[in-house]
Image (tube, grey):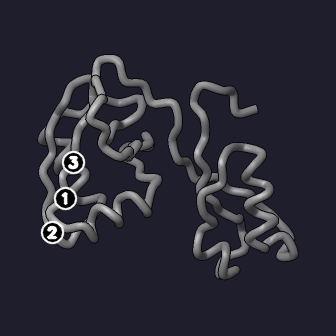
Amino acid sequence: IIKLLGKSLGYNFMREKLRRLWKLKAGFEMLDIGNSFFTIKFDIEEDRIKVNQEDPWMIFDHYLTVRAWSADLISQEAKIDTTMVCIRFPGLYLFYYDESIILAMAATVGKPIKVDTNTKDVRRGRFARVCVEVDLTKPVV
């Protein structure tokens, strides 16, 4: 199940944006289930794993939520309570480029999911980047 937060796109336009964004090895089927929700069926398991693990995705600076399909989903009543976001911690001393420290810092914002590979391997030093699941029903600050 996917939904673009804060923006609604037509079926064909959304499908083409996803095709370009995801760069899958095989194809996918997309079904509009209403209320700007779409179900996605991937032709191969490897593509499904890629889309779920490389979250968060963005289209036109809007987050694309990716969730597992649920048989009891009613799109007219469904609400997105959480989403993945990438946050940056700029100007850190190299001492802080430790995965456990960055995850602890990220925990102040939400549930830490993963540290960016470039951050973990200290390949770039302008900022540390981490993926965090945030609760949209609660204020961030």
Image quarter (top left, top right, bottom left or bottom right) of the N terminus: top left
Viewer-side label of 2, 1 = 1
| Image quadrant where residue 23 sits | bottom left
Query: Which residue position holds label 1?
Result: 42
Q: Is residue 121 above or below residue 48?
A: below
Q: Is residue 37 above or below residue 101?
A: above
| Image quadrant where residue 122 sits | bottom right
Determine contact: label 3, label 1, CB under 8 Å. Answer: yes
Looking at the rendered structure, the secondary structure element under dot 2 is loop
Picture residue at 15% right of the left edge, 69% below the top: 26
| Image quadrant where residue 78 sits | top left
Q: For marks 3 and 2, give the CA distance.
A: 13 Å
Query: Which residue position holds label 3?
Result: 40
Outermost residue, front side: 71
Q: Position of residue 34 (x, y in %)?
A: 21, 25
Looking at the rendered structure, the secondary structure element under dot 1 is strand
Q: Is residue 53 above or below residue 110?
A: below
Q: Is residue 72 above or below residue 57?
A: above
Image quarter (top left, top right, bottom left or bottom right) of the C terminus: top right
In the drawing, does residue 76 fall left or right of residue 117? Answer: left
In the drawing, does residue 91 fall left or right of residue 23? Answer: right
Determine contact: label 2, label 1, CB under 8 Å. Answer: yes
Q: Amino acid at mark 2?
A: Ala
Query: Which residue position holds label 2?
Result: 26
Q: Position of residue 136 (x, y in %)?
A: 57, 30
Looking at the rendered structure, the secondary structure element under dot 3 is strand
Q: Amino acid at mark 3?
A: Ile
| Residue count near mark 2 (Cα–Cα under 10 Å), binned few <14, some 14–19, many ≥20 | few
Picture residue at 72% right of the left edge, 43% below the top: 109
Give the mark, 3 or 2, whose residue is nearer the N terminus.
2
Q: Position of residue 9 (x, y in %)?
A: 24, 33
